[in-house]
Image (cartoon, grey):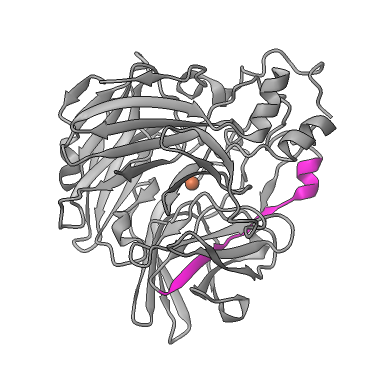
Amino acid sequence: MTTTESQPADTWNTPHLQGLMAPVFEERDDTDLAVVGEIPAALNGMFVRTGPNPQFAPLGAYHPFDGDGMLHAVYLADGKARYRNRWVESKGLLAERKRGRACYGGMSNYTIPDEDVLAEGGMLKNTANTATVRHNGRYFGLLEAAPPTEFNRELETLGEWDWGGKLQGPMTAHPKLDPVSGEMIFFGYRPVAPFLMYHEVNAAGELAHSAPLDIPAPVMMHDFAITENFALFMDSPAVFDLEALFAGGEAMGWQPDNGTRLGVLPRGGTNDDIRWFEVPNCYVVHFMNAQEDGDTITLRAPSMPDMPGGLKFEDPDGAREPNMWKWTIDLAAGTVSDEQTDDVPGEFPRVNENLTGRATRYGYNCTARGWEFDFDFTGVVKYDFEADSSSAFTYADTQVSGEHMFAPDPNGTAEDDGWLMTFVTDRTTEQSELAIIDARDVEAGPVARVQMAARVPLGFHANWFAD
Ligand SMILES: [Fe+2]
C-alpha cells in the first residue's frame, strides 16, 4: 500500500497537472468582472463549470479523472457578472484536510485508505468532479462512481444525497431532465452486480422507480439518452477489470468479443421490458440527443470505432477521433442501422435542453487539437441536421476552450434562440474568460467575453442554471 513516507515529492509533476490543467488553490469571490462586448440582458442565472482540481499532491500516478472537484461559477444578472469558485468538500477531502495530505489513490494507483480515513471518507473519494445538474431546486455535483453531492447556489457543499436511502449505488454524471414531465431519468453502473441500474426521479423530487438491468459484463457506461417514452443504453465492450485495478493496473480494457448493443427500455419499465439491438462495435462517451417518430428512434452521438488504450490516455493507441454518427432503430421491424454523418471530430455534444428526448434540428459539438484527454478544445460546431449543414467558430491559436453548453433565450421561440457559453483560456497570458456566443450566428464568435480575475483550470462539464 502506498504510504506518505513513500510518496514521491514530485507527484505534482505529472502531465495532467501542468500548464492550464494545473490546479488553483484560491477560492475567490470576484465581483463586477470586466466584459469585452455586452452580456445579453436575457441571461440571468449561473454558469457552472466543474472539473478536477486536487488540493494535495497525488499519492502516486495521477489520472485526469482523479482530482477533487472544484466548481467555478459565473453569475450573470442585469448584464453584470461575478465569479466564485469552491472545492467540493467531499468526506474524503475533509479527511485529507485534517491530515494535510492526500490519503486516496486514484484510478491508476487505487489503494484502500487507512482504517481511520476509511471510517471518515469511505472507500472512494466522491470528488463530484464531472458534471452538475439541478432538479427540483437542488443542485448536485456528480461523479459516476458515487451518489450525487448536493451544493447550494453559493457552491457550498451540503453533502451526499440518496433520496432518503432509496438510491443504492452510484449515479451517472449525465442524468437527463425531461423538459415536459419534469422527471430526472438516470442510471448507475458499477463493476459488481447488478452492473446496471435504472432510476426515475419524479417532478416532486422523489426516487419513484428503480430497476436492475442485465448486461453480460460490467462495462464503463458514461452516458445514455432518453426519448419521450424510452431510455436508451449503449453496452460497449469497455469492460471493467477489478482484479487489474487492485493489482495497480488499468480499471478498464477494450474486449471486442463482448460486442456492442443498444438497449431500448420503455420508461417506467424493468429488465423484462428492455429490447437489445446488436450494433457494430463502437464507443460513445456522450450522446447528443435522441427522438422517436412512431416506431422509429433516432440517436445521435460522437462515436469512436474502439478504445484500445482504455482509460490509459498516455497510450499512443488510446486516442480515437470521435465523429458524429446516427443510429436509427426500427422498433416494428426489430432492426437498427447506423451511419457516420460528419468527418469533423468533435465531442461534448449539447442541444437546447428544452428539447431533450424530442426532435432537435440543431446540435453543438466542441472541436479539439487532439483527443488525448488533455482538454485541448479549439471551438464549437453547430450542426443543422435538417439542412445537412454546419457552421463553426474557432478561437485563436493560443486559446483553449471547453464544453460549450446551450443557454436558451427565455424570450426566444426558435430552437437556436440562445447562447453557447464556455470558459476560454489563453496559453500565453493565462487570461481566462467566459465566452458567450449567439447560437443563431456561431461564426461571428463571442458577443461577450467576461474577463476572469484568475485562471480557471481546464475541466469537464458546464451547465447553465437560469434564475
Ligand atoms: Fe461526461
Q: Nearer the viewer, residue 393 or 369?
A: 393
Residue 114 appears anywhere in the view: no
In the picture, measured across the screen, residue 218 lies left or right of residue 29, that is: right
- In the rendering, at what x and y percent does residue 55 appear? 59, 22
Give the residue furthest to the bottom.
332
Of the 4 image quadrants, the one containing the N terminus is top right
Q: Nearer the viewer, residue 467 or 212?
A: 467
Inspect the magenta stretch and tell me whether residue 353 lies in it: no
Residue 94 higher or lower than 266, as above or below? above
Residue 25 higher or lower than 461, as above or below? above
Inspect the magenta stretch and tell me whether residue 241 lies in it: yes
- In the rendering, at what x and y percent does residue 170 appear? 63, 52
Q: Residue at x 69, y 17 (%)?
A: 100
Residue 353 appears anywhere in the view: yes
The region drawn magenta spans: 229-246
Q: Residue at x 38, y 17 (%)?
A: 454
- In the rendering, at what x and y percent does residue 336 appear? 45, 75
Residue 118 falls in image quadrant? top right
Q: Residue at x 26, y 27 (%)?
A: 81
